[in-house]
Amino acid sequence: MALSKEWYDAEFVDSESESLHRAPSIEYSFYNAVKTGDMEYVIKNCKEDAFIHLDGTGVLSRNTLQNIKYHFVVTTAMITRYCIDGGLEPEQDFAETVKTADSQGGLTLKMDSCSTVRQVADLHHEMAKDFTGKMVLQKKSSILSKPVTQCVDYIYSNIKERITIADLAAYTGLSESYLSRVFKQNLGVSISDYIREKKIEKATHLLKYSDKPIIDIANYLSFSSQSHFIQIFEGFTGLTPKKYRDRYYKSMW
């Protein structure tokens, strides 16, 4: 599926035809909830599967699956716009973001792999909650001290690497003890716990959307061993990586 053509076609129709949309207040409330980091509203909307209730939104394709995929592209574009308007840094334009949003191929390939409406809906929900989470962090960042913001950015950019407090101290130019104290004061968790949490978040994506062996995921995220990865993963999710993949990978694809 050539996303670039789909994207521009969907954008054109979205901009030019009011018949595509249900009552604007419904969609705009959702977009605004994402923009403001209202996770409670977004989760409720996703649980209700509002995205796949397309009455009043118009038809972009007579093929049901293709139609929902087009709506996914339009919705992702709108959410991106709202979030950028809300202060999220536009690291790259929308089309590039969709192509490279994740090391396993981003939203484009994930959407291409979907073979049912349910799978597209689940991907939509994950995308919306991911953007909402970014906006929550964006709001926190506005009140975070500069070194903590630097640490968060560094961890995000180097999540595949083995990251130590010493690395972050060197990066920010602060002592390890002072940085650790300020970080916990700002975010309520220790630096080590925050790093582990973000690595496990990345691991859940890889388990859902790739067929990489568990040992490869452990190595990719620089865990000291597969057993250590399993222990940390289970501590955060309540499931072993294998059980997590069995539950979510099969249901998604």
Image (cartoon, rainbow, N blue to C red):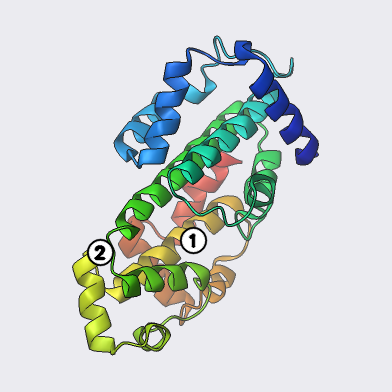
Residue appearing at x 44%, y 67% in the figure: 199
In the picture, the disc for residue 187 is 2
For mark 1, does the 10 Å Cα neighbourhood hold few (<14), some (14 to 19), or many (20 or more) residues?
A: some
Disc 2 marks a residue whose amino acid type is: Leu
Q: Disc 2 versus disc 1: distance between alpha carbons?
A: 19 Å
Q: Quadrant of residue 11?
A: top right
In the picture, the disc for residue 16 is none
Q: Is residue 102 left or right of residue 11?
A: left
Disc 1 marks a residue whose amino acid type is: Lys
Q: Is residue 1 visible?
A: no
Position in image of residue 202 (x %, y %): 49, 61
Residue closest to the eye, 173 or 64: 173
Relative to 61, say whether 83 is above or below.
below
Residue appearing at x 25%, y 64% in the figure: 187
Q: Is residue 15 visible?
A: yes
Residue appearing at x 56%, y 16% in the figure: 21
Q: Are marks 2 and 1 in contact (CB under 8 Å)?
A: no
Residue appearing at x 55%, y 76% in the figure: 219
Position in image of residue 243 (x %, y %): 45, 54
Quadrant, the C terminus = top right
The residue at which mark 1 appears reads as 202
Element type at mark 2: helix
Mark 2 or mark 1, whichever is nearer to me: 2
